[in-house]
């Protein structure tokens, strides 16, 4: 429960004069800030460089689809899970992410190991994130900007606005493949999910004497437990 | 008098330690543009003892801190929790201002000063964060970040008892911030050590209460929670030091690129 809730509650609950006072406060604060030399806003010019506008369009549509799908609470859980999987594969290049996350151990793995790893990785993603989307509770998002990232990609910056708690900054690294856009990394408050998982997997492999089998074993256990 | 000399000597030894760090650890500057690949490496030669301390911290969290934070969230209404958070943080402002200045970031120092004045005067002594509403978000700067800006490398990753993930440089930074903290200086001078303990406790519970669900999720979904936390901490820290998102490692095109 953060500022947003407080603001809404108090604005709904209290009458005119209080609101005026509040507005006055904010104005005074702004004035004081300016007078102490803190003038210009922190918003960076996100559109300064030219980014592929198609990536933002793709992101907007994917987000709308997700909200549309999961705000319907009457969907049976099994079906909601299927919807999640469909959206996941529509929006994300899961095999690419899986391979990237395994890093240098990918080439050490046999083809059979690679295949089993990719299957388990997909199940891990579903197990980790499906619940959060299915339990959708009124979050919305807005696209803040888009910047070119690397030579081929676009980083679309969004803000997830939660019914309770301060907004969360989430960046989506999007790559265009033929005519399709796919997300290949998600950066939440400066933390890359891909990098985090790569370092975690690397640690598990190292704990198991540098063998990919140790990671596959751990994934099997994790996925099995999640159902 | 005694306190002043103690403070001075602690400061001096911290400074010596910092300089020693500079001398030995200059090789891996965190802001080196060539360190793209280093972004995926963690310097953790003390992993075995670190994992031991991490496990102890986990136990302390599960047994004490997490339950305390849950009770806090359940028992104390949200506006009061916000006020407590704002009050504690506002009193850290002098440190943020000083560290901005030490980093040569005068704009940052102006922001921090503006926040401190705004919240202290208009925010009823700091319990209301009117500065954020007016568009000046909070941006803590600690001495660990200052050392990083001066070119001191991270040093080995360290998990500190109760304080949690850090590294050698940030541990030194934490020591310096603690000694220089005006609230602490006041607490010792006026013999109000109880207030300092109360603040430390409230601060820990406040910070923990903001991430109850997130930490639960991470714990449940991680294969190796120690490695996950280590990675999170390193990435967040790099962004805090640079005051902007840090570009990560390369994402090659596997289809056309030669094998890694």
Image (cartoon, coloured by chain):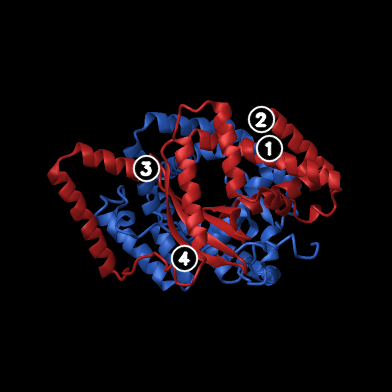
User: For mark 2, what is the residue?
Assistant: A226
| Label 3 environment density (alpha carbons within 10 Å; few <14, some 14–19, many ≥20) | some
Badges 2 and 4, same chain: no
Q: In 3D space, how far apart are the residues under numbered discs 1 and 4 (Cα atoms)?
A: 46 Å
Quadrant location, the C terminus of chain B:
bottom right
Q: In this view, does A127 lie above or below B93?
A: above
Comes first in the chain, label 3 or label 1 = 3
User: For mark 3, what is the residue?
Assistant: A2
Q: Which numbered disc, 3 or 4, marks the residue closer to the eye?
A: 3
C-beta proximity under 8 Å, tags 1 and 2: yes
Residue at x 59% of width, y 53% of height:
A183
Comes first in the chain, label 2 or label 3 = 3
Dot 3: what SS? loop
User: For mark 4, what is the residue?
Assistant: B99
| Label 2 environment density (alpha carbons within 10 Å; few <14, some 14–19, many ≥20) | some
Badges 3 and 4, same chain: no
| Label 1 environment density (alpha carbons within 10 Å; few <14, some 14–19, many ≥20) | some
Badges 1 and 2, same chain: yes
Q: Chain A is drawn in which colour?
A: red
Using the image, name the chain to which the residue with label 4 belongs.
Answer: B
Q: Is residue A42 above or below residue A142?
A: below
Badges 3 and 1, same chain: yes
Q: In 3D space, how far apart are the residues under numbered discs 3 and 1 (Cα atoms)?
A: 34 Å
Picture coordinates of residue A75, whole percent (x, y): 50, 28
Badges 2 and 3, same chain: yes
Q: In 3D space, how far apart are the residues under numbered discs 3 and 4 (Cα atoms)?
A: 28 Å
Dot 2: what SS? helix
């Amino acid at each position: 429960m953060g500022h947003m809730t407080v603001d809404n509650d108090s604005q709904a609950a209290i009458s005119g004069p209080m609101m005026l006072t509040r507005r006055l406060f904010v104005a005074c604060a702004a004035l004081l800030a300016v007078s102490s030399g803190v003038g210009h806003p922190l918003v960076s010019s996100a559109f300064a460089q030219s980014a592929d506008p198609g990536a933002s369009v793709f992101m907007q549509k994917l987000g709308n689809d997700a909200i549309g799908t999961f705000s319907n609470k009457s969907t049976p859980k099994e079906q909601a899970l299927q919807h999640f999987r469909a959206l996941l594969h529509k929006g994300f290049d899961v095999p690419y992410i899986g391979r990237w996350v395994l890093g240098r151990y990918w080439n050490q793995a046999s083809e059979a190991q690679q295949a089993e790893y990719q299957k388990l990785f997909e199940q891990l993603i579903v197990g980790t994130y499906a619940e959060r989307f299915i339990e959708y509770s009124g979050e919305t998002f807005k696209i803040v900007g888009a910047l070119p990232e690397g030579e081929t990609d676009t980083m679309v910056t969004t803000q997830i606005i939660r019914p309770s708690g301060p907004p969360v900054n989430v960046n989506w690294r999007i790559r265009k493949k033929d005519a399709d856009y796919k997300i290949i990394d998600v950066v939440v408050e400066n933390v890359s999910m891909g990098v985090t998982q790569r370092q975690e997997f690397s640690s598990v492999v190292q704990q198991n004497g540098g063998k990919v089998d140790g990671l596959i074993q751990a994934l099997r256990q994790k996925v099995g437990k999640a159902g | 008098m005694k306190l002043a000399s103690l403070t001075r000597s602690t400061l001096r030894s911290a400074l010596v330690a910092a300089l020693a760090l500079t001398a030995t650890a200059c090789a891996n500057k965190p802001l080196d543009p060539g360190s793209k690949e280093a972004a995926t490496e963690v310097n953790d030669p003390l992993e075995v003892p670190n994992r031991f301390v991490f496990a102890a911290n986990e136990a302390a969290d599960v047994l004490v801190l997490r339950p305390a934070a849950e009770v806090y969230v359940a028992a104390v209404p949200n506006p009061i929790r916000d006020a407590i958070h704002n009050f504690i943080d506002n009193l850290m402002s002098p440190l943020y201002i000083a560290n901005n200045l030490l980093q040569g970031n005068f704009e940052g120092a102006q922001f921090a000063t503006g926040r401190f004045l705004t919240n202290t005067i208009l925010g009823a002594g700091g319990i209301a964060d009117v500065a954020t509403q007016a568009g000046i978000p909070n941006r803590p700067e600690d001495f660990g970040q200052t050392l990083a800006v001066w070119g001191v490398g991270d040093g080995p990753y360290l998990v500190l008892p109760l304080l949690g993930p850090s590294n050698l440089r940030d541990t030194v930074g934490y020591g310096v911030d603690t000694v220089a903290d005006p609230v602490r200086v006041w607490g010792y001078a006026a013999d109000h050590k109880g207030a300092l303990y109360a603040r430390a406790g409230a601060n820990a519970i406040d910070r923990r209460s903001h991430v109850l669900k997130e930490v639960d999720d991470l714990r449940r979904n991680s294969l190796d929670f120690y490695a996950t936390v280590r990675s999170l901490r390193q990435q967040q820290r790099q962004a805090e030091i640079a005051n902007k998102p840090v570009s990560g490692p390369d994402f090659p095109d596997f289809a056309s690129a030669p094998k890694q």
